[in-house]
Amino acid sequence: MPNVAPAESEATLPRLEYAFAPLHKRAFGVAIGLAAGLLVTAATVVFILRGPNVGPGLLLLRHYFAGYSVSYIGAVIGFAWGFLCGFVAGWFFAFCRNLTIGVLIFFVRVRSELSQTRDFLDHI
């Protein structure tokens, strides 16, 4: 175990707890969902305002988002679909990140306890 001053290790502990704190799945999903929905809506409105020549890029969204079209109503439908897809992606990412961090912390704690037990048994 490295020699670390007690004041330095006590100051580092809150930073580590903050760094490894779990993400709130619903809040992260809402944040990503809003960003994705606004992105689809903004892209649709920009294409509408640019003129009648709509490129094939946004028209492909109608194959993935039921009811979507390059129109103002399509922008609202695109926002709803973008929010839904973004929410699911954000929630799943937060879930996977929390699970990974939890498993990592579990294995680090077990390894630390085993190394402390081994050192204790060596002194007996």
Image (cartoon, helix red, strand yellow):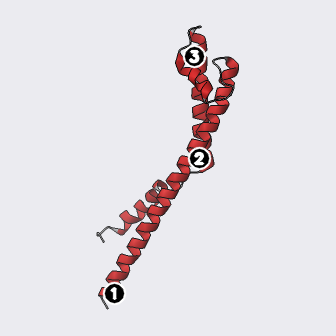
Give coordinates of residue 35: x percent, y percent.
57, 33
CA neighbours of label 2 inside 10 A, class few (<14), some (14 to 19), many (20+): many
Q: Looking at the picture, does residue 53 appear above or below residue 88?
A: above
Tell me what residue is drawn at x 66 percent, y 24 percent. Answer: 68
Q: Which residue is mark 3?
A: 46
Residue 43: tell me if it is visible: no
Q: Which residue is mark 1?
A: 121
Q: Are marks 1 and 2 in contact (CB under 8 Å)?
A: no
Which image quadrant for residue 7? bottom left
Task: Between residue 118 and residue 7, name the one nearer to us.
Answer: 118
- Amino acid bearing label 1: Leu
Give coordinates of residue 116: x percent, y percent.
36, 78
- Amino acid bearing label 2: Trp
Tell me what residue is drawn at x 61 percent, y 45 percent. Answer: 27
Which image quadrant for residue 123? bottom left
Q: Are marks 1 and 3 in contact (CB under 8 Å)?
A: no
Sequence order check: which comes first, mark 1 or mark 3? Answer: 3
Q: Secondary structure at mark 3?
A: helix
Q: Looking at the picture, does residue 1 appear above or below residue 46?
A: below
Residue 10: tell me if it is visible: yes
Tell me what residue is drawn at x 53 percent, y 17 percent. Answer: 56
Q: CA distance from mark 1 to mark 2?
A: 45 Å
Q: CA distance from mark 1 to mark 3?
A: 70 Å
- Amino acid bearing label 3: Val
Position of 85 compared to 119: left or right?
right
Q: Which residue is mark 2?
A: 91
Position of 117 compared to 50: left or right?
left
